[in-house]
Image: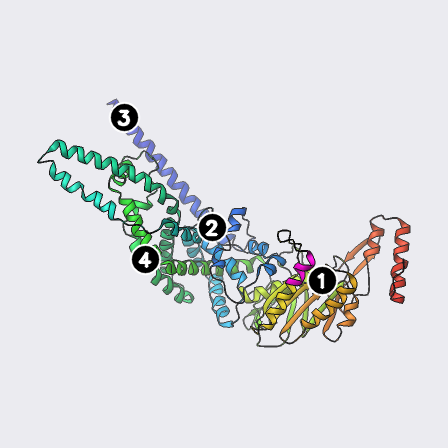
Amino acid sequence: MEYLLFILAMAVFVLVIFVSESARARKEEKRFVQSLYEDYGKLADKEYSLERFAKMDSFFLRHQKDGQLDDITWNDLGMDELFKRMNYTLSASGEEYLYYTLRTLKQEEEELLHLEDVIRFFGEHPDERVKVQLAVRSLGYTGKYSLYDYLDNLDYLGQRSNRKHILADLLFLPLTGLLWINFSVAIIGIVILIIYNIISYFQEKGEIDPYITSFSYVMRLLQTCGNLEKIPIPVCGQEWEKIGRAAGRMQAMKRNSYWVMSPYRGNASGDILAVFLDYVRMVFHVDLIKFNGMLKVLRGHMEDVDAMIEVVGYVETAIAIWGFRESMEAGTGKEEEGKKTGNGWCVPEFIREGSLTVEQGYHPLLDAPVKNGILAKRGILLTGSNASGKSTFLKTMAINAILAQTIHTCAADRYRAPFFHVYSSMALRDDMGSGESYYIVEIKALKRILDAASGKRGPVLCFVDEVLRGTNTVERIAASTQILKSLSRSGILCFAATHDIELTELLQGYFDNYHFEEDVREGDVFFNYKLQPGKASTRNAIKLLELMGYDAEVIEKATAQAERFVNSGVWKG
C-alpha cells in the first residue's frame, strides 16, 4: 500500500510540474504576442556581440550585384548603427536579409512598389503580421556562425556513402540465421559486429555532429516556410509560391529525420526510450545513414535553401521597415497621393532625370535633429565652421538617398530624385595594414567615384567631406578645384564640404554655395544647424582658442595675421 501511495504521490508531483510548466509557457507566449502588438515600432534594443555582427553580411556577400554600397560608403555613413536602429527581425534570415537590403540600391521602381505593397499590408493587418512573426520566431538563430558558413563547410565532409553501414547491417541477417546452426559461433560473430559498429559509430558521429546545427536550421526553415504558406497574405502570392516549390523539392530531407534531429540524441537524458534509441543508433548506424541521405538532398538543393532564406528574410524586412516607420517621429500631415506628409517619414518619388529635392530632411539616428531641405540642380559646396553641421548634412542627404532606394522610406517630408549609384569619401583614415598614408587612401577613394561615373551605369550621387585634407594648402586647393570640377560633369551630382573658402570662388560656375553659421555670445559658441544659401562669412577657429582660455597674446597675434592675409593674400609671420 505504501508503494502505491508513493507512486501516486510521484505521479501527482510530475503532473503538477507538467501543468505548471505548460501554464508558464502559455503565459510567456501570451506576453510575447501582446508585446508584438503593443511594442511594435518601439526602438529596437538588441545586444550585438562581435561574433554576431561579423556574420551579418553573409547573405550580402553571396548575393553581390551592381549598385550595392561599397565598404567605404557603408562605413563613412555609420550604416551599421542605422541597421541596428531598424532591426526588428526575429531570425538570422531576417537579420541577414535586412543587412543585404540596406546595401542593395534598387535601380527600378517596380521592385520598390511591390515592397511597398508588402510593407503596407503588414502595417495595416496586425493580426497577419503577428502570425508571420510567430512563425519566423520559431526559426530563430544559428549560433556563432551564419547558415551559409555551415553550408560552405559541408564540402569538408567530402563524398559520403552508406554502403559500409548497410553492408554491416546486412551481416546481422546471416549471423542471426547461424544461431540455429552453430549458436556459439553466431553469438561471437554478432558480438564482434556490434563492437565494431559501436567503435566506428563514435568515430563518424564526431565528424557529423558539428553539421547538425546547419541541418537543424534547414529543418526549421522548412517548417517555417510551411507555416508561412498557411497564412493568407494576398500581396505575398509570388513569395509563397516560391517557398512552396523550394520546400516541396526538399521533402525527402524531412522523412525519418528524427534519427538525426532528435533533441535526445546522445545527450544522456536518462529517458529509457531515448537510451534505447541511442543503442539502436550505435548498433545499426541509422542516424549516420539518414545523415548521409539528408546531406545528399541538401547538397543538391542549395538554391532552394537560398530561396527560402530569401523569402523569409524579405517578409521579415518588410515588417521591420514598417516598424522603423512607426518608430520615427510621427508625421503631422495627412496622406496625399500615396505619400505621407508631415515630419516623420515619406515614401520617395522617383524621376528619370533632373534635380534632387529634399524637404525637411533629417538624420534618423539623432534624438533631436534639426531638419533641412534643399533643391540640388547641380553640385552643392558647403562651407562653415567646425561643428556647424556640414558633415551631418552630408550624411543626412546620403542616408536618405540610400533609404529611398532600399527600404522605400525617407526621413523627410518629401524626397524626389532620380535613381542613383551612391558613393562617399568622408570618414577616411590611414591604412596601417598597407602602410598607406591618409592622402593615398583619400585619392584612391575619390578615384573610385570618378571611375564609377565614367562606367556609364547611371547617375552617381557622391558626398565628399573636406576634399584632400591630407596635403598642403596650395596643392590641396589646386587639386581640389580640378577634382570637384570633374565631379560636376553630367551624370554626377556631388555634395562637398570644405574649410577652404577659396573654393567657393574657384568653383562658382560649377557648384551652388551653401553654408552653416554660428553665433558667438556670452563666452560660448551656439550653432543653429540650419542650412543657409551662399558661402560662409564667419570664422570661429581663433575665437574658440580664446574661449578655451589660450593666452591673450596668442589670440591677438593670430587674429591680426589672419586679417592681413585676408586683405593682402600674402602670409606674414
Q: Nearer the viewer, mark 1 or mark 2?
A: 1
Query: Real-space Cα distance between discs 2 and 3?
Result: 43 Å
Which amino acid does the dot numbered 3 rest on? Leu
Q: In this figure, which residue is indicated by the disc labeled 2?
A: 34
The reply to whether callout 4 and callout 1 are in contact (CB within 8 Å) is no
Residue 292 in the image: state x and y as whole percent. 30, 50
Q: In this figure, which residue is indicated by the disc labeled 1?
A: 468
- For label 3, count other residues whose C-alpha is less than 10 Å away and answer few (under 14), some (14-19) or many (20+): few
Circle on res. 236: none
Q: Secondary structure at mark 3?
A: helix
- For label 4, count other residues whose C-alpha is less than 10 Å away and answer few (under 14), some (14-19) or many (20+): many
Which amino acid does the dot numbered 2 rest on? Gln
Which amino acid does the dot numbered 1 rest on? Leu
Q: Secondary structure at mark 4?
A: loop
Q: In this figure, which residue is indicated by the disc labeled 3?
A: 5
Of residue 488 and residue 225, the one placed in the foreground of this image is: 488
Please provide the residue range marked out in magenta.
437-444
Query: Real-space Cα distance between discs 4 and 1?
Result: 55 Å
Q: Nearer the viewer, mark 3 or mark 1?
A: 1
N-term mark: 3 or 4? 3
The reply to whether callout 1 and callout 2 are in contact (CB within 8 Å) is no
Q: Residue at x 38, y 54 (%)?
A: 221
Q: In this figure, which residue is indicated by the disc labeled 4?
A: 250
